[in-house]
Amino acid sequence: MKRRSKFTTASLYVVGIIYGLAILGPILWILLLALKNALDAFAYPPLFIFEPTLEHFIAIVQDPEFRLAFSNSVIISTGSVVLAMAFAIPATFAITIMRGRARRNSLLTILLIRMVPGMIYLLPYFVIYSRLDLLDTHIGLIIIYLIFCLPLIVWTLIPVWGAVPLELRESGMIDGANLWQILVLIELPLVRIGIIASGIIAFIFAWNEFLFALVITRRKTVTLPVIITHYMGYEGYEWGKISAASVIIMTPVVVFGFLIQRYMITGLTAGAVKG
Amino acid sequence: MASYEPIPQRAYLKYLSPSIVVLLLLTALPVLFTLYLSTSSLSFASPRPERFIGLRNYDRLLDDIRFLQSIPVSLLFIVVPVALQLILGFIVAVIMNERLPGMKWLRYLLVAPMVIPPIVTGLTWRVLFTPKLGSVNYFLSLVGLDGPSWLTDANWALVAIIIVAVWGWTPFVALMFLAAMQSFPDELYEAAVIDGATWIQSVRHVTLPLLKPTLTFIGILRTMEALGIFPIIYIVTAGGPAAATETVNFYAFVSGFSYLKVGYASAIIVVYFFMLLLIIGPTMRILLRNFQVDS
C-alpha cells in the first residue's frame, strides 16, 4: 500500500524500539530495585544481575499500616464506582436519546467537568468536611470522587450504549414494560461490557487519586498512594519499601489497563470526535 | 421509522436530572465557597475567628514574589510538555500505524504509563534522578555525558519535571492519535502513492491534515490536565529547589496546607480558576465549532 524505503523502515524500527525501551526502562528499574537488598540497591555502576530478595515485599505485606491502606483503597475505589454507576447508568440511558446539539452540549459539559483540576475544589472541601466531621471518612472521599468518576463513566459508556438500537425501547413499551424495566432488564445486559470497562476506568481513577486522599484522609482512611509517601519520612527514604509498595500498587491497575485497553482508547474517541 | 409512537423526551428527565443536580452541587458550591473564603481571614494556624477582609488577600498576592513566580512555571509546564507530547505522540502513532512486523508489543506497553498511579510515576523518576540510586546519570555517562544534579539545580529540576510529564502522558496521546489514524480511509494513501508521493510526503500531506481535529481535541485535553499537574511535582521536586518548580496550584496547596492560610490560599485558587477560564473560553469555541456528535 504505502511506499516505504528500506531506510525509512529501519528508522521507524529504531525510533520505535528506543521509545519502547524509554517507556519500559523506568518500570523495570523500580521492579529491580524492589528485588534488591540495601547493598545492591546502592551499588555503582548499577547491578543488573544480583540475587533477588523478597524482603521488601514481605516487610510491606506485614506492615499493618500498609494493609489498612490497601483495604481502604479497595473500599474507597469500589464504593466510588458503585455510587458513580448509580448516577451514570440512568444518565447515559437518557443521553442516548438525545440528538444533535443537545447531545453535543451534554457531552461537552461532562467532559469539561472531568477536566477541571481537582485543586479548584480541594480547599473548600477541606473546610466544609472539617466542619461536617467528614474528614478521614470513606464516604467523604467517595463523594468527592463522584465529581470525577461520574463523568468518566458516562463518557466511556456513551459509545457502547449508542450502538444499542432505540427501537428496543419502543418495542419494550409495546410489550408493557416501563422505562425503568427496559433499562434494567433489556438494555443493561446488552451494555454490560461497557459497564465493566467504564467501571474499571473509574476504579483506576479512584485507586490512583492522590491530591484529595492526601488532604482528606488521616490515620483511619489513608489510601495506598498516600501511605507510600510515609516511607519518604523521618529516617530518610526507605527505597526498598517505596519500590516494593510501588510495584504492589501499580500491578492491579496495569492488569486492568491491559484487559480494557481497547475501551480506554475508543471510549474517548468513538462517537465523540468527528472532524 | 415513523410508524411507532416515540417515548416523550421528558420521560427521561428523571434519569438525567439526579446526575446534573449532584454534579452541580458538588462543583458549583465549592467554587462559590472558595470565593467567599478568599475574602476571609481564615487561617488554621490562628485561633481567631475568621472575618471579612475584603480584597486584602488579593492585594497581598500582587506583592508575593513566590506567587508571581509560580505563574510562568505553570505556563512552562503547560506549553513545553504538551508540545513535546503532541510531537512525540504523533511520531509514535505513525510508527504504530505502519503495523511493522514484530512491533505490536509497543501498543500494549503504552498502556502502562497511562494507568500507573502518578504518585508511582513520580517516585520511580525520583529514584532515577537520585544520584547513586538512580540510573539517568549512569546511562548518560555510558554515552560520555556528565549528568547534572537534577533535583538540586533549579533549571534541571524544571527539565526533570518536563521529562516525567512527557514520559507519563505521551503514550495516551500516541494511542489516541493511533485510534484516529486507523479510521483514515486507505484510498487516500493509495491515491497518494499513485501520485508518486514518498512515504514521508504521504504522512505530511495525508495523515497530518486528517489528524488535525483529533490533534486539536487532544491538545486541549492535555492543556487542561497539564494545568492540574500536582503529584509529580509533589514527589519529584516538592516544588523545589527554592520554589523553582512551584506551579500556581502547588503554591495554593502549600499556602493552604503547609502554612494553613486558608483565606490566602483561596485567593490563589480564584486566580487559578480565572487562568482555567482563560483556557476554557477559547477551548469551548473550538470544540463547538469542530465537533459534531452523533451515534
Image (cartoon, rainbow, N blue to C red):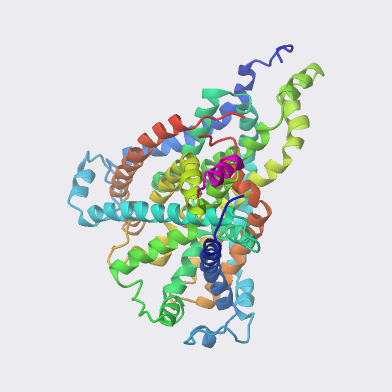
Residue A142: % across, % down? 56, 46
A187 within the magenta span = no
Look at the image and tell me whether residue A50 can be seen: yes
Residue A183: % across, % down? 72, 29
Q: Farthest residue in the left direction?
A: B63
Q: Above or below — where is A226 with respect to A92?
A: below
A189 left or right of A161 in image: right
Q: Nearer the viewer, residue B235 or B212?
A: B212
Q: Nearer the viewer, residue A249 or B163?
A: B163
Main secondary structure along the magenta-highlighted residues = helix
* Residue A173: quarter of image: top right
Residue A36: % across, % down? 57, 82
Look at the image and tell me whether residue B260 can be seen: no
Magenta-tinted stretch: B186-197
Residue at position x 35%, y 71% from top? B151
B156 left or right of A60 in image: left
Q: Nearer the viewer, residue B272 or A127?
A: B272
Q: Farthest residue in the right direction?
A: A175
Q: Nearer the viewer, residue B246 or A143?
A: B246
B193 within the magenta span = yes
Residue A60: % across, % down? 60, 73
A139 left or right of B131 in image: right
Q: Above or below — where is A20 with respect to A262?
A: below
